[in-house]
Image: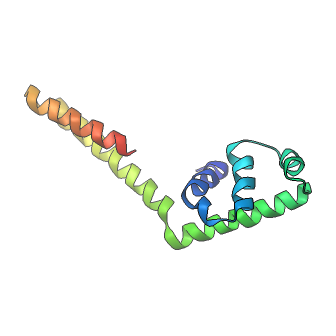
């Protein structure tokens, strides 16, 4: 998974555990796509201070993930759901009964809502 995407997901999962300043800087950089210079100007600190705060916030997010593992569990759950959906589609192809096919479609829709 790309580093920026990973940070963005971790920020969604653990962002409230960061300081308000760290959260804002990480959100501006990774989600709002602002440059270090733009963030520094908006906040009134140096570009280097923004970079230092970003690194500290990133490290905190990775530490939270190491301890809690929510993103890893989420990725595994999504893979499992995707595999189940593929299995359901195979069953649907093999079944001739329309009522069973309708039930299979409902199950598939519910699983898709979990992804």
Q: How far from the left and from the top, in percent, is residue 16?
A: 60, 61
Q: How far from the left and from the top, in percent, is residue 96?
A: 9, 27
Using residue 77 as the reference point, say whether residue 33 is left or right of it: right
Which residue is nearer to you in this view: 10 or 20?
20
Please say which color scheme the image uses.
rainbow
Give the position of the C terminus as an image quadrant.
top left
Using residue 32 as the reference point, say whether residue 78 is left or right of it: left
Q: Is residue 101 above or below residue 111?
A: above
Q: Is residue 53 above or below residue 78?
A: below
Q: How far from the left and from the top, in percent, is residue 12?
A: 57, 53
Q: Residue at x 61, y 71 (%)?
A: 63
For this orientation, the residue located farthest to the right is: 46
Q: Residue at x 84, y 57 (%)?
A: 50
User: Total number of numbered labels?
Assistant: 0
Q: How far from the left and from the top, in percent, is residue 27?
A: 69, 50
Q: Is residue 32 visible?
A: yes
Residue 15 placement: quadrant: bottom right
Q: Is residue 79 above or below residue 97?
A: below
Q: Is residue 96 visible?
A: no
Q: Residue at x 10, y 26 (%)?
A: 98
């Amino acid at each position: 998974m790309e580093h920026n995407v990973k940070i963005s997901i971790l920020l969604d999962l653990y962002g409230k555990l960061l300081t308000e300043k760290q959260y804002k800087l990480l959100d501006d950089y990774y989600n709002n796509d602002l440059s270090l210079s733009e963030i520094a100007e908006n906040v009134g600190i140096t570009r280097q201070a923004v970079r230092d705060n970003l690194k500290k916030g990133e490290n905190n997010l990775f530490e939270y993930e190491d301890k809690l593992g929510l993103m890893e569990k989420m990725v595994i759950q999504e893979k499992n759901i995707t595999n189940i959906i593929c299995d359901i589609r195979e069953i649907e192809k093999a079944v001739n009964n329309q009522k069973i096919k309708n039930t299979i479609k409902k199950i598939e829709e519910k699983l898709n809502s979990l992804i």
